[in-house]
Amino acid sequence: MKSFSVASILAYSAAVAQLASAHMALTEPCPRYSPHCNPKPELPAGASFDYSIKNPIPPDGELCKGTVPWPSPVATWKAGQDVTYKFESGGAAHGGGHCQFSLSYDGGKTFVVVHEVLGHCFFSGKSTGNTAQVTEYTFKLPAEVPNSDKVIAAWSWVNAIGNREFYMNCADIKIEGSSSSSYTGKQIVIANHDGYPTIPEFGGNYDTGIEYYQNAKQVTVTGNGSSSGGGSDDAKSSAPATPAEGASAQSTVGATEGSATDSAESNEEGGKEKQQSDAVDPAASAGNEAGSEAGGEAGGEAGGEAAGNEAAGNEAAGNEAADSSQSIQDSMTSVAEEALSSAAQEGNGIGAQEGGECTSGLMQCSGSGYQICVNGKWSPEYACGVGTTCKGTEGHIFCDFASSD
C-alpha cells in the first residue's frame, strides 16, 4: 500500500510550488494579524499572528480571516487621493484571476468596491505563470467615500488556475478629507465559498465568471456605519442578472473597465508593476510562513493544485522540482526550525511547552486530515491530499490511500 509521510508531503508541496512557496498576501495596508508587516502593529488582546495569512479562506471560514480589528488604524487615507495596495513578492499568483479592492463601514457586513482588476490580477496580461509580475496597485480613492476611523480596506481574489478558492485580507484604516456622508458603488463579489457561487478554472478564458462582477448590485455605505442595498449574506444570492432583470453594475470611480480583456491596459494605468525574478530560493520563500501554513499547504495543495497547475501548462515548477527534491526537503526542515525559533522570539510561545493542551510542533490525525500543535493549542484540521486519509498515532502520522491497488 502506498503512503506518504507528512514530511514527504511538505517536501512535495514545496517542490511543486518552488517558484513560490505560498499564495498572495497583502502587506500594505497591513492586514489583520499579519506577521509580515514592518512595523508590526500591536495585536488585539488575546490574538496571535496569523502565519497562514497567505492561505485561501476556508469554505466555511471568516471572510476577513479575523473579526477583531487592529487596536488602532494602520493607515490614514484621504478621500480623492491616490492609495496603494502592496503584496508580498514571491507569492503564487495562479495565472491571475479577478481582484477587487473594497471598503466596509459596518464591521465587515457590507463591502463596496472602489477598484477592481479583472482577469489578469498580478499580471500585465494573459499568463499561465505562477510568479506574480505585479505586486503593487495604486489608484485614486473616490472623493465621495465618507470619513471614518473604523474603515475596513479589503483585497479579495478569485484565482484563475488551480483549486477553486477565495482569498481575502482586511486592513483597518482611517479615511479623512471627505465632504460626503455616503458612497454608492458595486457590492463585492464572493465566490468559491460556502453558500456562494463557484467560479470554475478559467482554462484560458479570462472572462470566466465576469458576469458576477458586471452584474453586481449597488450598495451604499455611510460614515456612521449604516449600510443599505445588501450585505455579505445578501451576496450569496448575487447570481448574474438576466438582461430582462437589469443592466450591469455602474462602474465605480477608479475601477477597471467591466470587460476582463481591458484589465492589462488598466494595470499599466492604475497599478505599479514590479517584475519578480524567475528563480526564487525555496528556503527564503518558505521562510515567510510558520508551521501552520506549511501544514495547510501540504494538505490542501499537494494533490489537486499541483495537478491543476501542471494541466494549465505550468511546467517550470515541476521540472525544477525533479532536480532538487532532496535540497528542498532539507531546506524545509531548516525553514521549519527557523520559523519556530523566530516566532518564539516574537513572544508567540511556539516551541516546546509544558502544561498546555499539546506540545508545539506535534501533529495528530483529526478526522480524515490532521492538526498541528501551535502555541500549545491544536490548529484547525488540515486536509490530506486528494484520495488519502490521515493514519498513525500522535508524533508519527502519515497520509495514506484508503485502499491498495
Image (tube, rainbow, N blue to C red):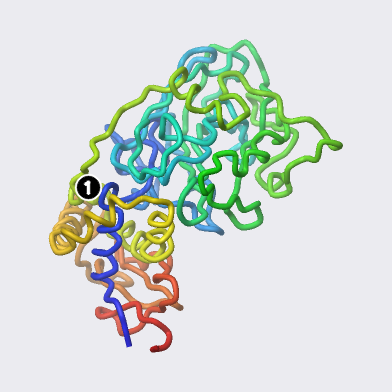
Residue at x-position 65% and y-position 26%: 224
Closer to the camera in the image, 178 or 6? 6
Q: Position of residue 327 (x, y in %)?
A: 13, 59
| Residue 334 sits above or below residue 145 on the image | below
Closer to the camera in the image, 81 or 127? 127
| Residue 217 sits above or below residue 380 on the image | above
Mark 1: few, some, or many residues within 10 Å (few <14, many ≥20)? few
Q: Quick check: can you spot residue 47?
A: no
Closer to the camera in the image, 214 or 333? 214
Q: How many marks?
A: 1
Which quadrant is the C terminus positioned in?
bottom left
Image quadrant in which you'd find residue 355: bottom left
Q: Quick check: can you spot residue 403?
A: yes
Q: Amino acid at mark 1?
A: Glu
Q: Position of residue 33 (x, y in %)?
A: 38, 44
Residue at x-position 61% and y-position 53%: 198
Residue at x-position 38% and y-position 34%: 30
Left of 405 or right of it: where is 203? right
Which quadrant is the N terminus positioned in?
bottom left
Left of 361 or right of it: where is 117? right
Residue at x-position 33% and y-position 56%: 293
Left of 293 or right of it: where is 242? right
Closer to the camera in the image, 255 or 40? 255
The residue labelled by disc 1 is 346
Q: Position of residue 159 (x, y in %)?
A: 48, 46
Q: Position of residue 281 (x, y in %)?
A: 18, 46
